Amino acid sequence: MQHKLSENIKKYRKEMNLTQSDLAEAFGITEGAVSKWESGNTVPDISLLMDLADFFDISVDTLLGYSISSKNIDDIISKMKNLLDEGKYDEAVSVAEKALVRYPGNFKILYKCAHTYGTALRQSNAKEYCKKAIELYENSIRYLYQNTDPEINEFVIKMEIAHVKFWDDIDKALADFEALNYMGVSDVQIARILMRKGKTDEALDKYTRTMVRALIHDLDMAAGMFIALISTGKNKAFVEASELMEWYLAIIDATSNGKISYLTKMKTVVLAFKAMSLSCSKNYGIMRQCLDEALALAKEFDKKPSNDFNGKIKFWHASEDFSTSVYDEIGCSAVDGIDNLFDEMMGKATPDAVVKKMKEAREYWDSIKHNE
């Protein structure tokens, strides 16, 4: 390795038309130090290797002369994961240490080794693991251009760093989470830290905000999955779609305090969805019950429409400045909203065979709506 390193330092220096003196000046070292590197008498410090690689615009592995095998790297990562799963944290760290010596400029190694140290930290509370995990995560950002995993980006890595800091310095962790709190993504972590700092009211505010966002997010998820299931045209999927709506109805009922709120409108939508799936399954009796309940709730909502949750649901502990107004695309009126929902579900995006199966639900809805 040393022979290759000395050759490569000389090679890439010359490719940049630099003298040994120029390179020495760029790194604040003596010309003699560069000469010793290139002659193979000494090697740069590992931290300087990364700077040299960046300077030459190559990876550390290339600078060291490694021919990287993705299989070797994947094997190392798999070994670390297996050891962590088995609770052999010290052994996993040992594998990480060796991997970092061999592949100091490889993104996957840096990122996964950082994860290994971070996981070991949670079990041993060793401060040196905390420092090492943060260092590796920060270094991995420098090599992010090598990353091929679409789920990993700089934001994700910075969140990982904040999680590691939680085990060492909660004030620094809090500052990081607050800086990364895009659309409330860090609210739970912030609340957890606030609890440790004895700020219960502030923590409850954050937990309430998270709960409200979860209610809306879960409805979006459930509605999307419902449509996907229904669109398959399979009987098993119709049953599953109905069960999915029952699951969300249970969440609504457990959260409602009986007051009219946007949660009421959400329930009318879920009942309508459930009725559609029951129509597809030819379970017309329960289908009618769902639509009867949906209409009654929709009319109650439309008497006093509400687009928020403020103080109108259980577990509400948010501060007064938290606005929860929600605006959807199905319309202000809950009754009209169900009409629009049927129009959309029975439109061009839904297979004709499924539309025919939902026809019974639509006809029953129209009949009870007009009879009122």
Image: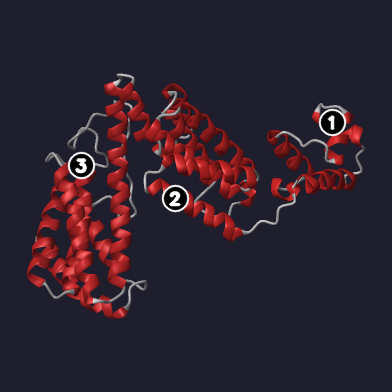
Q: Earlier in the sequence, mark 1 or mark 3?
A: 1
227 up-or-down from 31: above or below: below
Q: Are marks 1 and 3 in contact (CB under 8 Å)?
A: no
Residue to which mark 2 is pinned = 81
Sort mark 1 into few (<14), some (14-19) or many (20+) by Cα contacts within 10 Å: some
Q: Are marks 1 and 2 in contact (CB under 8 Å)?
A: no
For the residue labelled by badge 3, is the local secondary structure a helix, a strand or a loop?
Answer: loop
Tell me what residue is drawn at x 19 percent, y 74 percent: 280
Q: Earlier in the sequence, mark 3 or mark 2?
A: 2
Quarter occupied by the C terminus? bottom left
The circle on residue 261 is 3
Rendering quarter of residue 55? top right
Tell me what residue is drawn at x 27 percent, y 76 percent: 355
Q: Earlier in the sequence, mark 1 or mark 2?
A: 1
For the residue labelled by badge 1, is the local secondary structure a helix, a strand or a loop?
Answer: helix
Residue to which mark 1 is pinned = 33
For the residue labelled by badge 2, is the local secondary structure a helix, a strand or a loop?
Answer: helix
Tell me what residue is drawn at x 83 percent, y 37 percent: 41
Amino acid type shown at disc 2? Lys
- Residue in front for this viewpoint, 107 or 68: 68
Sort mark 3 into few (<14), some (14-19) or many (20+) by Cα contacts within 10 Å: many
The image position of residue 186, as x and y in percent, is 40, 35
